[in-house]
Image (spheres, rainbow, N blue to C red):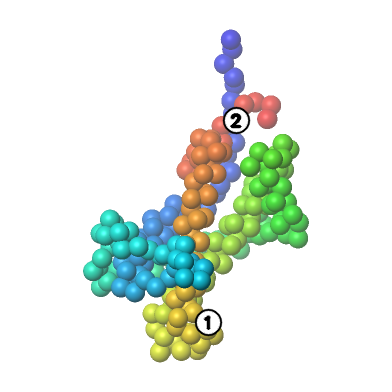
């Protein structure tokens, strides 16, 4: 049996996009970890129906198992340093997408929400027809654009709770200190959920897709 001839398709993901993507991963990981060190000092959030607590963020065993207790000062030091690195990387990423024209592949259009539902149905195995083969499908456009907005939200709410007196106008705009802190926490949970879904999608897409985000090219059979 003759081996299948393959060819390399270059530049699926530009070097800058790959750089910002892989730099952002450890930055966000440190931000979440250090945020948990801070959150330990006062962790009031829970999902409750009447008197029944369905989910508590987080039980004491969670902090103890991950050695997060009594490290408030350490968490604040890490968080406030990496906040600026996270912000700089995000600003450079947005600037690059605007000036390079990559935003055209990322920004959702008026059909994206309808098409994203079709992508979800296909991923769940309910719909056989695969979505149109674009650089990013509709669901990815919405998710990646939402993460950019979440990053902005994290920056603004973070500044509001970091400097509530100096940034009183911002804290007030966000509904006060407690409101800003709750939004900041909810955005963090959103990052974790995005990360889980993103990893599942990467595994589902296979090695070739992962390699394209590392090396910037695909290896596909001739004729495709």
Residue 108: give x, y in percent of width and height: 68, 59
Q: Nearer the viewer, residue 174 or 63?
A: 63
Q: Rounded to the nearest whole Å, what is the CA distance between mark 1 and mark 2?
A: 49 Å
Q: Is residue 117 left or right of residue 179?
A: right
- Measuring from the top left, give residue 3's x and y in whole percent: 57, 16
Q: Which mark is residue 123?
A: none
Q: Looking at the image, can residue 60 be seen?
A: yes
Query: Image height check: is 94 above or below 2?
Result: below
Q: Which residue is mark 1?
A: 174
- x then y, percent, for residue 92: 50, 64
**Mark 1 burial class by Cα count in 10 Å: few <14, some 14-19, many 20+:** some
- For the view shown, which residue lies furthest in the left direction? 70
Q: Residue at x 27, y 71 (%)?
A: 72
**Which mark identifies residue 220?**
2
- Could you tell me residue 45's position as x and y percent? 43, 70
| In this view, 172 is above or below 101 | below
Sequence-wise first label, 1 or 2:
1
Residue at 69% over, 26% down:
223
């Amino acid at each position: 049996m003759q081996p299948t001839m393959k060819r390399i398709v270059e530049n699926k993901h530009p070097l800058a996009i790959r750089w910002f993507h892989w730099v952002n991963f450890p930055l966000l990981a440190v931000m979440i970890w250090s945020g948990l060190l801070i959150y330990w000092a006062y962790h009031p959030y829970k999902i409750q129906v009447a008197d029944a607590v369905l989910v508590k963020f987080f039980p004491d065993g969670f902090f103890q198992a991950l050695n997060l207790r009594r490290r408030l000062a350490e968490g604040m030091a890490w968080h406030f340093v990496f906040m600026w690195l996270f912000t700089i990387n995000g600003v450079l990423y947005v600037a690059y997408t605007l000036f390079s024209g990559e935003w055209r592949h990322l920004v959702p259009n008026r059909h994206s929400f309808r098409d994203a539902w079709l992508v979800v149905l296909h991923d769940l195995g309910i719909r056989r027809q695969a979505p149109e083969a674009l650089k990013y499908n509709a669901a990815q456009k919405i998710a990646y654009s939402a993460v950019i907005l979440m990053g902005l939200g994290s920056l603004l709410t973070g500044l509001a709770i970091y400097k509530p007196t100096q940034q009183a106008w911002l804290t007030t705009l966000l509904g006060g200190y407690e409101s800003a802190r709750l939004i900041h926490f909810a955005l963090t949970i959103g990052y974790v959920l995005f990360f889980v879904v993103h990893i599942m999608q990467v595994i589902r897409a296979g090695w070739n897709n992962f390699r394209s985000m590392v090396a910037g090219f695909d290896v596909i059979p001739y004729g495709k």
